[in-house]
Image (tube, grey):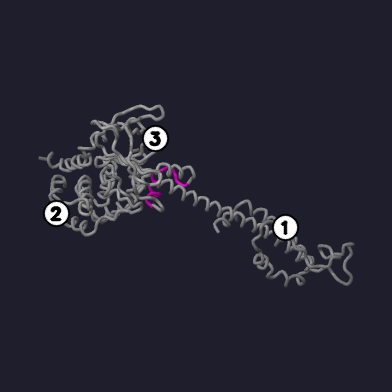
């Protein structure tokens, strides 16, 4: 319908209007010559019949000839030019020819309109197919998926438009959404801010707001990404609920405490479950140096104990439980062992192990490298820049590792080195630093401790 309305004002209708005007003028002239009484019954009601008789056509319609004897011309005259004996010129002969011509012209235009409708429908189907491909690409590699949607005109290159796409989430992996939102770039951080602003936390208690927020994506494992996301959440919550906490740092620390409580209470691998008193004690002094009401903290504890956070199950691999707080995660190029080809893999560093996956949405890792009797160093390669490698140390000849082969079987790796390539020298150095300290140190708790000190800073400064 919208297409037809637009075409009424467009160039396609102009030839039709000219044709109608000519036909109508001819028809009126013939009608006046024939006399008002002769054609009035035939004229009345004929317009509605024209339109009701129009049908879908695949091209130009063959013009229908009026049912007159073959010895008569198109206007009722004999072919020799003489008038028929005993008869005057019939108004039916004049009006029927004109009406059938106009009907034929209208039929042609309607066929053109329907052909345009078909083209529009085909175009819409093509866009829907491109959007489906874009979603699949996003789920495998968020950056490539977003770029594909840009190139096909399905997304604008603005943080607001990308945030709307992620927030709607139709057909998108929640893990991939979390991965994209956590990326450390100016544009991705702008998308994260716009994404958080699409949530309305007005008049929600903190646990309810967290449930809504953490359902819209899967929280990534890397501490730096979690920090950026929770910082945005805390600022948004305090903006919409200004009378609950004295500052956003208090909201940030308490939100983290709730997430950690959820993991501790509902992760089967955690044997010693925290008690309510312990939860209260660990959150003392976070409200600008003062304590939050004990009743509030106990109610938060009971809420999490009764109903754990619902984590999106889009890929069956609950990173919040399995890889809740890895030291680092990200894309690296990995060199093969037998064949020295390079393949892009998603790496997660956690619990003294380095895991690598083909895609961020994979349920199982393609390989696991325990960080035992192993060292890491920067290196160079003629094919790839910014390389680092893991190599056997401590008297070991081979790196103890395992991977899945092409048939899905788990086999033991036989590497003396694992060589990887990062996108930048800075990223390579970050990986090397994280690998070196992964056995004994976890940066997540340092980050939380620093934020706690910040939340307590004002009251100590006042004293």
Residue 370 lies left or right of residue 53; in this view the side is left
Q: Main secondary structure of the magenta part?
A: helix
First in residue order: circle 2 vs circle 1? 1
**C-alpha span from label 1 to label 3:** 82 Å
- Residue hosting label 3: 338
- Residue hosting label 2: 275
Q: Position of residue 143 (x, y in %)?
A: 40, 42
Mark closer to the observer (2, 1): 2
Q: Name the secondary structure under disc 1.
A: helix
Q: Position of residue 228 (x, y in %)?
A: 28, 42
Disc ID at residue 145: none
Relative to 56, does residue 38 appear above or below in the rendering?
below
First in residue order: circle 2 vs circle 3? 2
Q: Is residue 156 magenta?
A: yes
Mark closer to the observer (1, 3): 3
Crowd around label 2: few <14 · some 14–19 · many ≥20 (10 Å): few
| Labels 2 & 3 near each other (Cβ < 8 A) | no
**Residue range of the region highlighted in magenta in the rendering:** 154-168
Crowd around label 3: few <14 · some 14–19 · many ≥20 (10 Å): few
Q: Is residue 328 visible?
A: no
- Residue hosting label 1: 22
The residue located at (81%, 69%) in the rendering is 90
Quadrant housing the N terminus: bottom right
Q: Position of residue 225 (x, y in %)?
A: 29, 42
Residue 258 lies left or right of residue 346; in this view the side is left
Residue 70 lies left or right of residue 100; in this view the side is right
First in residue order: circle 1 vs circle 3? 1
Q: Name the secondary structure under disc 2.
A: loop
Query: Which residue is at the front of the view, 79 or 168?
Result: 168
| Labels 2 & 1 near each other (Cβ < 8 A) | no
**C-alpha span from label 2 to label 1:** 91 Å
Quadrant housing the C terminus: top left
């Amino acid at each position: 319908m919208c297409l037809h309305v637009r075409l009424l004002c467009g160039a396609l209708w102009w030839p039709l209007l000219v044709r109608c005007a000519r036909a109508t003028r001819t028809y009126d002239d013939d009608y006046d010559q024939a006399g008002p009484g002769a054609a009035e019954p035939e004229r009345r009601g004929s317009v509605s019949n024209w339109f009701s008789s129009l049908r879908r056509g695949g091209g130009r319609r063959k013009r229908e000839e009026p049912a007159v004897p073959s010895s008569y011309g198109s206007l009722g005259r004999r072919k020799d030019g003489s008038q028929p004996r005993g008869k005057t010129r019939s108004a039916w002969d004049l009006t029927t020819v004109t009406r059938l011509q106009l009907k034929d012209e209208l039929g042609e235009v309607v066929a053109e309109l329907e052909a345009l409708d078909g083209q529009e429908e085909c175009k819409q189907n093509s866009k829907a197919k491109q959007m489906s491909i874009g979603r699949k690409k996003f789920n495998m590699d968020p950056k490539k998926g977003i770029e594909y949607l840009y190139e096909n005109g399905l997304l604008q290159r603005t943080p607001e438009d990308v945030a709307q796409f992620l927030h709607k989430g139709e057909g998108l992996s929640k893990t991939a959404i979390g991965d994209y939102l956590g990326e450390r770039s100016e544009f991705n951080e702008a998308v994260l801010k716009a994404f958080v602003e699409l949530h309305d936390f007005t008049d929600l208690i903190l646990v309810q707001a967290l449930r809504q927020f953490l359902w819209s994506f899967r929280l990534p494992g890397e501490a730096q990404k979690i920090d950026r996301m929770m910082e945005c959440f805390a600022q948004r919550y305090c903006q919409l609920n200004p009378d609950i906490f004295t500052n956003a740092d208090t909201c940030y620390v308490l939100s983290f405490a709730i997430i950690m409580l959820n993991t501790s209470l509902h992760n089967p691998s955690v044997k010693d479950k925290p008690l309510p008193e312990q939860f209260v004690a660990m959150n003392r002094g976070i409200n600008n140096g003062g304590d939050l009401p004990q009743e509030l903290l106990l109610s938060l504890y009971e809420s999490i104990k009764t109903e754990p956070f619902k984590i999106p199950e889009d890929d069956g691999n609950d990173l919040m439980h399995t890889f809740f707080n890895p030291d680092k995660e990200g894309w690296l190029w990995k060199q093969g062992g037998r064949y020295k080809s390079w393949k892009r893999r998603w790496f997660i560093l956690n619990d003294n192990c380095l895991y690598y996956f083909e895609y961020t949405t994979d349920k199982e890792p393609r390989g696991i490298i325990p960080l035992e009797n192993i060292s890491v160093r920067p290196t160079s390669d003629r094919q790839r820049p910014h390389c680092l490698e893991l190599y056997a140390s401590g008297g070991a000849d081979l790196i103890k590792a395992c991977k899945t082969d092409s048939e899905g079987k788990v086999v033991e790796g036989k590497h003396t080195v694992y060589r990887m390539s990062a996108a930048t020298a800075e990223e390579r150095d970050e990986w090397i630093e994280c690998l070196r300290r992964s056995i004994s140190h976890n940066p997540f708790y340092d980050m939380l401790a620093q934020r706690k000190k910040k939340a307590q800073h004002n009251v100590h400064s006042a004293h």
